[in-house]
């Protein structure tokens, strides 16, 4: 499974609807993510540039893309920004792999 962090905005219409009829979007999102084989780890409303932040554990990029596309296609969210996240153990493995690759790599301009 792969961890993805997504930030996004609610549309004006979605905000108006939730003011009239408040709902816990984490419950709906959790069921949606589960249908794609993933798990909602956390969901937060945020201040600032984005309205919400989610942490989702998904089987892979294709499933995460499907989650995002179907959510955006429903029309209540926009400006989705998703980042793949690695654990410190996974990052250590990436650094070790980079160490193996680095000696044979020549940078731009022969550097």
Image (cartoon, grey):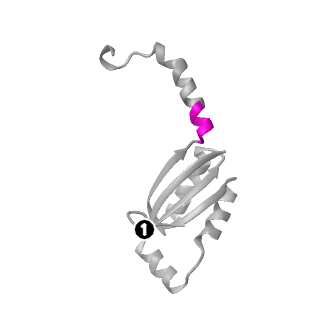
Q: Is residue 6 above or below residue 28?
A: above
Residue nearer the viewer, 53 or 93: 93
Residue on which disc 1 sits: 47
Name the image quarter holding residue 79: bottom left
Residue nearer the viewer, 6 or 89: 89
Q: Is residue 94 magenta?
A: no
* Residue 102, percent from left and from top: 48, 18
Neighbour tally class for label 1: few under 14, some 14-19, many 20 plus, Cα within 10 Å: few
Quadrant where the C terminus is found in the figure: top left
Q: Is residue 95 above or below residue 1?
A: above
Please report the residue visible at 50 percent of the width from the left and 86 percent of the height from the top. Answer: 20
Label the magenta part by its dominant secondary structure.
helix
Please report the residue visible at 44 percent of the width from the left and 63 percent of the height from the top. Answer: 78
Give the mark count. 1
The residue range painted magenta reads 87-92
* Residue 88, percent from left and from top: 59, 39
Q: Residue furthest bottom?
A: 20
Please report the residue visible at 62 percent of the width from the left and 36 percent of the height from the top. Answer: 89
For the residue labelled by badge 1, is the local secondary structure a helix, a strand or a loop? loop
Residue nearer the viewer, 20 or 111: 111
Left or right position of 35 against 51? right
Quadrant where the N terminus is found in the figure: top right
* Residue 53, percent from left and from top: 51, 61
* Residue 61, percent from left and from top: 58, 44
Q: Is residue 90 magenta?
A: yes
């Amino acid at each position: 499974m792969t961890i993805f962090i997504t930030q996004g905005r609610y549309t004006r219409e979605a905000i108006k609807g939730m003011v009239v009829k408040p709902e816990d979007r984490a419950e709906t999102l959790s069921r949606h993510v589960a249908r794609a084989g993933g798990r909602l780890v956390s969901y937060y409303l945020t201040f600032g540039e984005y309205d919400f932040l989610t942490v989702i554990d998904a089987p892979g990029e294709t499933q995460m893309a499907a989650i995002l596309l179907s959510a955006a296609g429903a029309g209540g969210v926009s400006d989705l920004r998703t980042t793949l996240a690695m654990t410190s153990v996974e990052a250590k493995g990436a650094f070790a792999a980079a160490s193996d690759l680095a000696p044979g790599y020549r940078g731009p301009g022969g550097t």
